[in-house]
Amino acid sequence: MALASPGPVLAHAAEVHLETVRAVAVVARYDTGAPMAGAQITVYSPANPAEPWLRAQADAEGRLVFVPDAHVGRWSVQARHAGHGAVAHLMREEEDGTLAAGWQTAPASGPDPLQKGLMAASVIWGCIGTALYFRRRNT
């Protein structure tokens, strides 16, 4: 019987980049640069952030273009594909009616320092608890 070693396992996250012209061009890609072809794109208006304003599908290059209406505030754009997803936000400012794009991905590419500290403390606590359990059983 021959044993084969498994190949390398590669992980990746997702990103959404927004460009503003008269319309909003959504480009959904994985962090490897590969497009999120056919990703489900959901747009939420500031007028009703609980209900989708638009549901659409990205093309083969992970792109979708839409024209937001005149609602002032934060628009949210969500892209999901094959278990990965990202969210980006777009602000429509009241003074001049222009759009200002600022994006952030969600979920984050990795745990933040607080999460890392909590995970380390949990592992240490688990090791101490296990050691005390086995120590008590031997006495």
Image: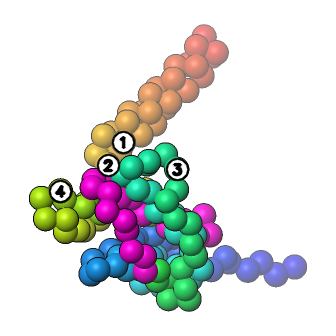
Mark 1 surroundings: few (<14), some (14-19) or many (≥20) residues within 10 A: few
Q: Which of pointers 3 and 1 indicates the residue nearer the eye?
A: 3
Q: Secondary structure at mark 3?
A: loop
In the rendered image, the residue lying farthest to the bottom is: 60
Q: Which residue position is annotated with label 2?
A: 112
Give the residues drawn in magenta, as a range.
Answer: 65-84
Q: Are marks 2 and 1 in contact (CB under 8 Å)?
A: yes
Q: Nearer the viewer, residue 50 or 105?
A: 50
Whether residue 6 sits left or right of residue 3 in the image: it is left
Whether residue 105 sits left or right of residue 62 in the image: it is left
Q: Which mark is residue 94?
A: 4
Between marks 2 and 4, how big is the CA–CA gap?
34 Å
Whether residue 71 appears in magenta in the rendering, the answer is yes
* Label located before the other in sequence (3 or 2): 3
Whether residue 137 sits left or right of residue 20 in the image: it is right
Three-letter residue code for mark 1: Gln
Q: Are marks 3 and 1 in contact (CB under 8 Å)?
A: no
Q: Which residue position is annotated with label 1?
A: 115
Mark 2 surroundings: few (<14), some (14-19) or many (≥20) residues within 10 A: few
User: How far across and down, in percent of the image, does residue 73 sit?
Assistant: 27, 53
Three-letter residue code for mark 4: Glu
Q: Which residue position is annotated with label 3?
A: 51
Q: How many marks?
A: 4
16 above or below 118?
Answer: below
